[in-house]
Structures are given as C-alpha cells and as structure tokens.
Image: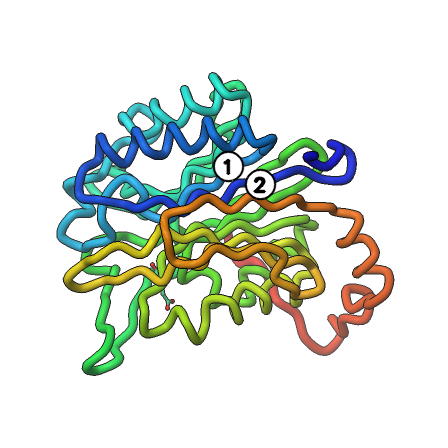
Amino acid sequence: MAPSKSSGFRVACIQMSVVNDKAKNLAVAVTRIEQAKQNGCTLAILPECFNGLYEIDLFRKNAEVIPSGETCKALSQAAKSNQIYVVGGSIPELYNDKVYNTCTVWDPNGKLIATHRKVHLFEVNIPGKTCYREVNGMTPGNTLNTFQLDRFKVGLGICHDIRFPEMAELYRKQECDMLIYPGNFCMNLGPLHWSLLTRSRALDTQTFVAFVSSARVPHPTYITYGHSQIANPWGEVIGEADEKDTDLYVDLDFSVRENMRQQVPTEKQKRNDIYDVILKKN
Ligand SMILES: O=C(O)CCC(=O)C(=O)O
C-alpha cells in the first residue's frame, strides 16, 4: 500500500533504455509514467537526456523549445491523464540559439511548475578511460530551482550537479525535504561514486535524495552505469535498481527526516559565525 499522503508518497524512478529515436523514447516514457500511476506512485522521475542519446553531437538535433516542443507536450499530457507529478529527467533545451540541459517538472494538471538548467556541466579527462566536455554542446544554467509537491519541497539538480555539496547545502537552507538528480554516470566513475554521492548528499542535507539513471545499453563511447537509487536522510539506500531496464518504486516516509533532524541536530549546530555557504545570485 502506498504511504498516507500526510507522511509521504511513493516515487517511481524510471530506468528506461534510451535509444537514438526520439519518438520511441517518448512512447516508452509515457507508458512507464502510466505504469507508475497504476502502481500507486505520486511522482515519476525520468533520467537525464531521456529523449535521445547522451552525445554531444546529438544535443542540438534533439533540442526543443520549452514548453512548446514535442517532449514537453508528451510529458504534460502524461502527467495530466494519469494525475501524477512528473520530473521529466532532462532534455536538450533550445533557447536563444543556445542549448541547455534542462529538467522540466509537471503537476497532475499537466502544468509546468519548475525547470532546472544543469548548472555544472560534465567535464572530466581520465586518459584512456573517460574524456567528456559537455560544454562543447551545452550552455550551463545559473539558477537553483525547487518545486512544491503537496507540503514537501523538492530541490533539483542534474547529474554532475550532485558532486557539488554547496549546491545541496543551499537547498538544505531553503528547507527542501528531498533532492532529485536525473543522471547518467559512465562505467568508469559510476561504480565508485554514484552511490557514495547519493548517500553523501542525503546525509549532509538530511533529505531524501533520488538519483535516477537510464538503463545500461550497448553504446560505442558512453556506457551508462544504471543503478537508480534513493537514499534516506540517514544516508541509507532504501531502494536501488540494477543496471537493467526497470522501474524502481520506493515509499518515502518523511517522518524519518523529522526524526533524523531531532536525533542528530547538525542543522542547529552549524557554526555560521565561522563559515557559511551563500547564494550569490538566482
Ligand atoms: O560526474 C560524473 O562523473 C558524471 C557526470 C555526468 O555524466 C553528467 O553530468 O552527465
């Protein structure tokens, strides 16, 4: 049984296979959102760049204007017809001839209630393993973004954004109850860092953290780790997928967050007289 609305809700992490065919990806996403609703979920979360492959050369080709593009129309309709909140992973967004890696959030009336443009673009250079410069195909966003799901406040990040504890700390300061990061780690960094980062952000902020990947599919250059998961405010992983095409359903009970904050009251112990993390612009 899904949790009662006052204590929490059930979440679907949709770990779908993403292929080089936008129409197919949209059809899969819509079906899986419908299944999430049938399984008692209040919120469905899609992975990063779910409407096309995570490839620099394809970003502009798959880019759409938000909210008039076909992906937004499909997500809005899926949210409305299933009466469910949808965090639409991310898509390449075309705006003033620039391309952003953007997450859209839809309420159960199909209304766009938030967007988040990835702030920290992925750049690594591990010779012989992974070299990636997302900045060659995307422009970074400059704002932090939240939305309200009933009485719960949710902060948004995309993939590499999870590596930056300062951003999560600012969401903690804004009293977020949960952080959501659609993502796609590679096989070199995923096994070492994916779960560690999910648990770390959950523990530092004493919130629930959902890190949602696409499924691992054969690809010449970028093999996705998978392992979508949710950690609770204690830093425990309370649900985890393997690498396959699957959906992970997790019940969130926010009384756990209250208990954690009372029993380990680090929020009240911060020494802001000697250090601080501040938001410079939004
Ligand atoms: O930070 C990482 O290791 C991976 C990040 C990534 O793949 C992304 O931001 O899309």
Query: How was this image coloured?
Result: rainbow
Which residue lies under the disc numbered 1? 44
Where residue 220 sits, quadrant-wise, is: bottom left
User: In front here: 63 or 270?
Assistant: 63
Depicted 231 relative to depicted 13: above or below: below
Residue 45 visible in rendering: yes
- SS of the residue under disc 1: strand
Q: Is mark 1 within 8 Å of ligand 1?
A: no
Residue 11: assigned label? 2
Residue 125 numbered tag:
none
* Residue visible at 52% across and 41% down in the picture: 12
Q: Residue furthest bottom?
A: 127
Q: Residue 194: give x, y in percent of width and height.
A: 46, 67
Image-based side of 171 in relation to 22, left or right = right
Tags 2 and 1 touching, CB below 8 Å? yes
Q: Quadrant of ligand 1?
A: bottom left
Please tell me which residue is depicted at 46% across the width and 44% down the height of the picture.
247
Q: Nearest the camera: 58 or 185?
A: 185
Type of the residue with mark 2? Val
In the rendered view, tell whether residue 11 sits above or below residue 187. Answer: above
What secondary structure is found at the residue carrying circle 2? Answer: strand
In the image, residue 234 above or below residue 149: below
Q: In terms of depth relative to the viewer, which is nearer, 52 or 243?
A: 243
83 sits to left or right of 272? left
Question: Among all residues in the image, which is located at the extreme right?
Answer: 262
Neighbor class of circle 1 (other Cα within 10 Å; few <14, some 14-19, many 20+) is many
Image coords of residue 55 (percent x, y):
19, 54
Q: What is the CA distance from the residue labelled 2 to the residue labelled 1?
A: 6 Å
Q: Amino acid at mark 1?
A: Ala
Seen at 37% across and 73% down, the residue is: 189
Residue occupying the point 73% across, 32% down: 5
**Image quadrant where one finds the N terminus:** top right
